[in-house]
Structure formats: structure tokens, C-alpha cells
Image: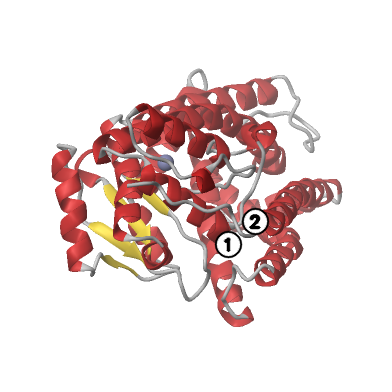
């Protein structure tokens, strides 16, 4: 059957929306950097450390207490950019939340950021004070375990923001379970992730490793795509499972974490972490703003490396999907629909900033596969000039 695909209806809107998102991401980092700089140059980190030392003699508790005002400053500094992103989402009719619900989601996201940040800080400071010679390696391992736990808990974490329930569509569930059996994989329940009251965007993801693997599909994905197209997207997610992509990403992330902590440890030892009068090493909660700055900068570079691996994995999962389904047509039409829905559009030149390859390239590769395997492609499916993120 000829593959009927359409050109995206809103490439210009997509480009404008993506440009706004990218600009706001850069602005977020700049405001974050300036906020930490202001926090430190005004000496708030010293007074908060003195207060923490007066409250408790426990160094790890002191560090945690010092994190509270720093986290609050970062949260307040990021608020204008969050407001702009909300406005952008409303302007392009992607976001459906009202202001009250959006504020509540922002609050919950900031609480999670506090907990995650506190865990990373405690891992770094405790490892480097308890095992000074190998602290950076221990901190890398602890943070990797933390990210494994976060990845494994993804359905629960998402359920803090949206209802996450076992897929209620029985016919689709049967179809997808047959696909899982065909792939000879063991996957836990497939979840429906109900985001349609907040956004029109659609997504699918696989979280966890081994028996803890879970596939999550947004309700917007299932209401927009046909069952065959959903099957093609799930086949892509099964490709991530079969090719052990999550495990490999977590392993690489673990190496990146150790490298980040190694660099920070070197900076602390060489007195290159600013904002302290006297360098007494890791046993000083005044190091906190400098640590957070180094961590975030190094994390961004680490994500670029991870992105290169991730894009290669996405291409491999695409190929796996076409082979498993036996055709590329449903995948092509699904990608066109998702481009229209999610509006995240970028060119191949900007691909290095993203975890996914340019969608135009993914569709072109799928069309090439279809032609090579005798699958008819309609002329309407000529390579699109745009690309989107997600899946
Ligand atoms: Zn993927």
C-alpha cells in the first residue's frame, strides 16, 4: 500500500517556536550564572555558611542548609524564563494549562530540583571528605546510581505531574503485546501518560533496565496516531530495549559524572573554585556556589557528548522498528504527524544541540528503506525540510 504522508502544516510556526525555546534555554543559563555570581559576590554564601555552622556541628547538614538559600535564588532567577516558556507554549497553542496549574507544576518541579541537587551535593562533599584520594570516582558512582534510580522511577516521577495508568485501550494493548512477543523481549506494563489536559504535545519513552523496563505513551500520541503508527513508535522504543540503549547511556553517563567530579576536584585542589577567602578543600560549605557553577557547565558539555551517542542510538532504533514491523510507512506518517503536533523544528546544522537526529533525515532514511524493500512511497512524502524532537 502506498505510504500516504503529508508535509508539515506549520513549519514556520515550528521554526519560530523552536527558536523561542532555544533562546529561552540560553537565557535560563545566563540568568542562572548571573544569579550565582550575585549570590557569591554579595557574600550571602558566607553568611549562610556561618548561620549553618551556628545551627549544627554536622558538616553534611551544614552543606544541606547552605543549599536551601542557593536553590531558592536559582529558582527565583529561573522564574522569568519559565513564564516566557509558558507564554510561548500558550501562543503556539501547545500548552493548555491555566496559570494556577502551571504554577503548581513549577513548584513541584522546583522541589524535585532541590532534592536532586541536594543528593548530588551530598554525594560530592561526602565522597571527597571521606575518601579524599578517590572521592571523585566514588561521587561519580553515587551520582550514576542516583540517575539509575531516577530512570527506574520515571513512571512514578511523571505521576507526580500527570496521571500515569496502565494502557486502558485493550485492543491496542493486545496489538502492542504481540509486538513485544515478536521482538522476544520482556517489558513491564505499558503505561498511558495522560498529558492532554496540559499540552497537545505527544511523546513516547522507555525507562528502566532489565525487568524494570517500562514503556510510556502519552494519551495525545494515541489520540492523534493510528494504531499502526503507534505500533511503529513502540517498535522504535523496543529497539532501545533490544539494543540495550538505556544501559549504555547510563554507563556513559556514569563515566561523564566521574570526569565532571574529577575536573571539580582538580579545581578545588588548585584553588580555582572562586568565592572562598581561604582554600581548606572540600570541608567548606562556602564552596557550594562555585561547585554548582562548575557542575552545571561541565554537565552541559557532558550532555553534548551524550547527545552524539543518543542520536546514533535513535537511528539504530528507527531501523529496528522498520525491520520488526516489516514496513516503514507507518513510521513515516507518524513522524510527520508528530512534527505538526510538537512544533520542535530544527535543521541538521543545529542537531548537535539535541538528543534526536533531524526528523527530516529520519524520514528520508525511512523512505530509502521503504524503497529498498519494495514498499511504495507516494510523491507527497518527498523529504520534508524540517525536523522535530521527541520519541
Ligand atoms: Zn528513541
Name which residue lies at 57% across and 69% down.
107
Q: Which mark is residue 357?
A: none
Dots 1 and 2: beta carbons under 8 Å?
yes
Q: Is residue 67 above or below residue 101?
A: above
| Residue nearest the viewer, comparing 359 with 35 | 359
Cα–Cα gap, marks 1 and 2 = 9 Å
Q: Mark 2 sits on what residue?
A: 71
Give the quadrant of ligand 1: top left
Q: Mark 1 sits on what residue?
A: 110
Label 2 residue near ligand 1, CB within 8 Å: no
Name which residue lies at 72% across and 19% down.
270
Q: Earlier in the sequence, mark 1 or mark 2?
A: 2
Q: Counting other residues with Cα less than 10 Å from the Cα at mark 2, is it few (<14), some (14-19), or many (20 or more)?
A: some
Res 115 seen here:
no
Residue 273 lies in quadrant: top right
Q: Quick check: 233 left or right of 380?
A: left
Q: In this view, does 240 lie above or below 102?
A: above
Res 199 seen here:
yes
Helix, strand or loop for disc 1: helix
Helix, strand or loop for disc 2: helix
Q: In this view, does 87 lie above or below 2?
A: below
Residue 161 percent across, percent down from the top left:
45, 68
Q: Quick check: 317 left or right of 210?
A: right
| Residue nearest the viewer, comparing 60 with 291 | 291
Residue 344 percent across, percent down from the top left:
61, 52
Q: Quick check: 79 left or right of 380?
A: right
Residue 142 percent across, percent down from the top left:
42, 35
Residue 330 percent across, percent down from the top left:
36, 48
Nearer the viewer's eye, disc 1 or disc 2? 1
Amino acid at each position: 500500500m502506498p505510504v500516504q504522508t503529508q508535509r508539515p502544516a506549520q513549519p514556520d510556526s515550528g521554526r519560530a517556536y523552536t527558536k523561542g525555546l532555544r533562546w529561552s534555554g540560553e537565557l535560563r543559563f545566563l540568568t542562572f550564572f548571573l544569579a550565582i555570581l550575585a549570590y557569591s559576590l554579595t557574600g550571602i554564601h558566607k553568611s549562610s555558611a556561618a548561620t549553618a555552622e551556628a545551627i549544627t556541628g554536622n558538616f553534611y547538614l551544614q552543606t544541606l542548609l547552605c543549599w536551601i538559600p542557593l536553590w531558592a535564588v536559582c529558582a527565583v532567577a529561573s522564574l522569568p524564563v519559565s513564564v516566557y516558556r509558558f507564554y510561548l507554549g500558550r501562543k503556539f497553542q501547545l500548552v493548555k494549562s491555566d496559570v494556577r496549574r502551571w504554577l503548581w507544576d513549577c513548584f513541584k518541579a522546583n522541589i524535585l530540583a532541590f532534592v536532586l541537587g541536594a543528593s548530588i551535593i551530598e554525594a560530592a562533599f561526602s565522597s571527597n571528605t571521606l575518601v579524599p584520594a578517590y572521592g571523585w570516582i566514588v561521587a561519580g558512582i553515587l551520582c550514576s546510581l542516583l540517575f539509575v534510580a531516577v530512570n527506574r522511577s520515571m513512571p512514578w516521577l511523571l505521576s507526580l505531574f500527570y496521571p500515569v495508568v496502565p494502557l486502558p485501550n485493550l485492543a491496542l494493548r493486545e496489538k502492542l503485546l504481540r509486538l513485544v512477543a515478536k521482538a522476544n523481549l520482556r517489558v513491564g506494563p505499558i503505561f498511558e501518560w495522560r498529558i492532554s489536559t496540559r499540552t497537545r504535545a505527544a511523546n513516547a519513552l522507555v525507562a528502566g533496565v532489565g525487568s524494570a523496563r517500562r514503556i510510556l505513551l502519552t494519551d495525545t500520541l494515541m489520540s492523534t496516531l493510528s494504531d499502526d503508527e503507534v505500533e511503529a513508535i513502540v517498535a522504535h522504543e523496543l529497539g532501545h530495549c533490544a539494543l540495550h540503549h538505556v544501559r549504555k547511556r547510563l554507563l556513559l553517563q556514569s563515566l561523564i559524572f566521574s570526569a565532571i567530579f574529577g575536573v571539580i576536584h582538580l579545581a578545588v585542589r588548585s584553588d580555582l573554585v572562586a568565592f572562598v577567602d581561604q582554600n581548606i578543600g572540600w570541608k567548606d560549605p562556602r564552596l557550594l556556589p562555585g561547585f554548582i557553577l562548575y557542575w552545571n557547565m561541565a554537565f552541559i558539555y557532558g550532555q553534548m557528548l551524550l547527545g552524539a551517542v543518543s542520536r546514533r542510538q535513535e537511528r539504530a532504533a528507527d531501523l529496528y522498528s522498520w525491520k520488526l514491523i516489516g514496513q516503514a510507512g507507518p513510521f513515516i506518517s507518524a513522524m510527520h504527524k508528530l512534527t505538526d503536533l510538537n512544533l520542535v523544528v530544527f535543521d541538521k546544522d543545529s542537531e548537535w544541540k539535541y538528543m534526536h537526529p533531524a526528523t527530516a533525515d529520519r524520514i528520508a532514511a525511512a523512505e530509502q528503506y521503504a524503497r529498498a524493500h519494495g514498499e511504495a512511497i507516494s510523491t507527497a512524502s518527498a523529504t520534508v525540510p524540517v525536523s522535530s524532537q521527541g520519541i
